[in-house]
Image (cartoon, rainbow, N blue to C red):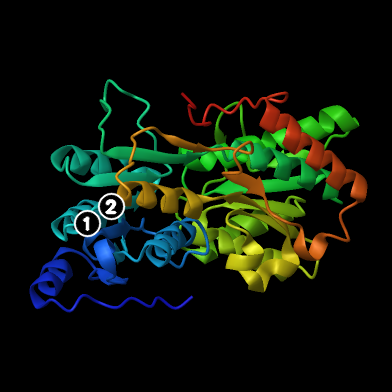
Amino acid sequence: MVRLMRTLTTAGVLALTVAACGSPPSESGKSEGGAKDFKACMVSDSGGFDDKSFNQTSFKGITDAVAALGISKAQLESRSDNDYPTNVSTMVRQKCNIVVTIGFKQGDVTYAQAKQNPNTNFAIVDYSYTDTAKFPPLPNLQGLVFNSAQPSFLAGYLAAGMTKTGKVGTFGGINIPTVAIFMDGFAEGVAYYNQHKGKQVQLLGWDQATQQGVITNDFQDKNVGKAKANDLISQGADILLPVAGPAGLGALEAAKSSGGKVNAIWVDTDGCVSAAEYCSSLLSSVEKSMDVAVTKAVTDAFNKKFTNTTYVGTLANKGVSLAPYHQFDATIPAELKSEITALTADIASGKITLASKAQPVTK
């Protein structure tokens, strides 16, 4: 997706932001009624707003809020981790009423800015401040997190039920909780399938017990992701779950070039929507409704109902889900689909609980 960002026209602001980081903030929105003075702002992580993954979906949340409320918005795209402090502080100086940051690695920066600026609301995607000794609660700071282990469990069960080689694989971008949670859930889904079906499907790329596995140490380089995917494919994996942002697109390229021998499951968004060119290789996707959570946080701030209570997306509240099967709908056996529907209900009700330590605290 081509990045279309209109730069602010105020010369002083432009000079300030160009000096501060790689790209100036973009701003747009309506100016109707009381909404004209309300500005919602967003800072991406280093993956950028066109990552076909969680930055892109989070950004949709703020644009949806702009459309619904008639407010204005501004956004800054981080080109590296070093941009985070400058970009967040720049948004504060732009007199944003709410600043939404994206990604686990912006946790410390977002907290520091929220503490320094009590009159500005802050929300952060994929981070919750559960260590209250280190992060005493702030009334103007809300975490937006998602129990991605739950739909990843369903994805693992699906992969185990669809593999022809008896081997499936996964890899992550960086070994942090918001990445590990997908691979943990995937591992548990495969194990559950084996236990209940008397099978021995092997998971390559992640060991839940040791929390170690195949890691790219990169969220941007598709070539690195493709190399990791091809390595797993060479070991026999015919279904892949890449958890590596844009780098994970390399795995989709590897699957697509296999001529149907290898398929994949995307994460964060419905890959058949965000990366439609790979839909023919996607069994499904593990979705996080980050757009809905962001829209709600912005709307609450606009309506002066903002809260610091952590939002946790689950299967029960539809904050996470397994996407439709799209082009594989007729290929996946009806029995397997029925089992996944039943498992979804059992996880949502609490009948089935997951072991992943990366799951967000719900209290």
Please state if 363 lies on the left or on the right of 242 as rendered. Answer: left
- The one nearer the camera, 207 or 127, is 127
The answer to whether 8 appears left or right of 245 in the picture is left
The residue lying furthest to the top in this view is 133
Q: Nearer the viewer, residue 74 or 31?
A: 31
The secondary element bearing badge 2 is classed as strand
The local secondary structure at tag 1 comes to: loop
Q: Amino acid at mark 2?
A: Val
Whether residue 126 is visible to the viewer of this picture, yes or no, is: yes
Q: How many marks?
A: 2
Residue 359 picture location, percent across and down: 53, 31
| Spot occupied by residue 154 in the image (x, y as percentages of width and height) | 72, 41
In whole angstroms, how far apart are the C-alphas of marks 1 and 2? 6 Å
The residue carrying mark 2 is 99
What's the residue at 73%, 65% (across, down)? Answer: 281
Q: Quadrant of residue 109?
A: top left
- Indicate which disc residue 96 carries: 1
Question: In the picture shown, does residue 272 fall above or below 292?
Answer: below
Tell me if label 1 and label 2 are in contact, CB under 8 Å.
yes
The label number, if any, that marks residue 183 in the structure image: none
Position of residue 362 in the picture relative to residue 185 (left or right):
left
In the picture provided, is 196 more to the left or to the right than 242?
A: right
Q: What is the crowding at mark 2: few (fewer than 14 residues within 10 Å), some, or many (at least 20)?
A: many
Q: Nearer the viewer, residue 207 or 241?
A: 241
Residue 142, how many percent across, how many down? 34, 39
Identity of the amino acid at label 1? Cys
Nearest to the observer: residue 211 or residue 346: 346
Q: Residues within 10 Å of mark 1 (few under 14, many from 20)?
A: many
